[in-house]
Image: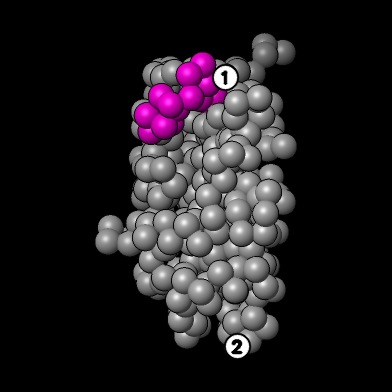
Amino acid sequence: MFRYGLVAFIVSSSIAVPASGWAYEIKPKAPETAFSAKLQPDIVGLSSNTEGSKASPLFEAYLKDLPGVKPETAQQKFGGTNVTYVTAMKFTLGATSSHPGESMLAVFSSPASANRAYYISRVLGFSADKQPSKTEMIERITAKYGQPTAIGDSRMYYFYKAGKLMSVKQKYTPTTALEALNAPINPKVAVALNDANGRGSCVAELKRAQALEKTLDKLVTEAKAANCDGLVTVEISQGITADRVSKAEFTLIDFKQIISAAKIDADAFAAEKNEALNKTPLGNAPKL
């Protein structure tokens, strides 16, 4: 369960226009990111460059094939102002007799850090009579994201650092990729993903981040500990037979953006609070 304090998800087909508040000017500052214009992985069009205020059309475009399913929007006000912004969007389709169920979630920073997505996940289910083969899934994932950094533990891992896709010198063919997917991650690969200063492998940081509440303050510690700037992973679950796929879970995390946005947002919230205090009318001393 993803929690956002007291902010509730509201079913909607469009983003609410921010309400006007007291005259506090938010000056957006783009956070640093793990990705570049030429290397910008996405999950059905959603990337860490996507702004919360512009995410609705992307959700709706995807949901056109799922009649009756609407995106849900979580919003909150910026500090003590009446300026409202999108903190998260999601949809959830429970399993039915005709559909195995699926879901998607995107979480965004505040307007101070350009309201950018820093955590995106998608769970895609396949009904028993339409389960693709693992080989087909590997081919499609590779066609979209390129050759993975590593494969193992039923996951394909793409780790990014210094604007590039990290390499641990693993080359995969369709056959060896399938073999690696069905086996534990190679211990030598896991060690190679650590750095000399003891920063943790992004394999471990991914799993920790998936288990945490998806707010910046909860994720920033893991982001700082990760030996990569960002990642995309796809976890492939076994289907009705060992060579088939029942579910695929996609995850995109921009660790570098989490660290940068957390600082920008904290500074902006502190500045807004300080300005609000300075604008608070002061009383006169009583007549004695």
Q: Which residues are magenta?
A: 58-73
Image x and y of residue 269, in percent: 53, 40
Is 62 colored magenta in this rendering? yes
Task: Write down the quadrant of residue 127 in the picture.
Answer: top right
Residue position marked by numbered label 2 in the rendering: 196
Image x and y of residue 137, in percent: 49, 56
Residue at 63% across, 47% down: 246
Residue position marked by numbered label 1 in the rendering: 10
Question: Image height check: is 263 above or below 181?
Answer: above
Image x and y of residue 129, in percent: 59, 39
Question: Image height check: is 64 above or below 272?
Answer: above
Query: Would you say 278 lies left or right of 55 here?
Result: right
Residue at 67% across, 83% down: 187
Image x and y of residue 195, in percent: 58, 83
Check the image and tell me how it is coloured: one colour
Query: Would you say 103 lies left or right of 53 here?
Result: right
Q: Are marks 1 and 2 in contact (CB under 8 Å)?
A: no
Task: Say what secondary structure mark 2 lies in.
Answer: loop
Q: Which amino acid type corresponds to the residue marked 1 in the rendered image?
A: Ile
Query: Would you say 105 lies left or right of 285 here?
Result: left
Q: Residues within 10 Å of mark 2 (few under 14, many from 20)?
A: few
Number of the label disc, if any, that sits on residue 229: none
Q: Residue furthest left?
A: 38
Is 225 colored magenta in this rendering? no
| Residue 53 visible, this orientation | no
Find the distance from the CA under tag 1 to the CA under tag 2. 46 Å
Q: Which amino acid type corresponds to the residue marked 2 in the rendered image?
A: Ala
- What is the quadrant of the C terminus in the image? top right
Residue at 37% across, 48% down: 49
Task: Say what secondary structure mark 1 lies in.
Answer: strand
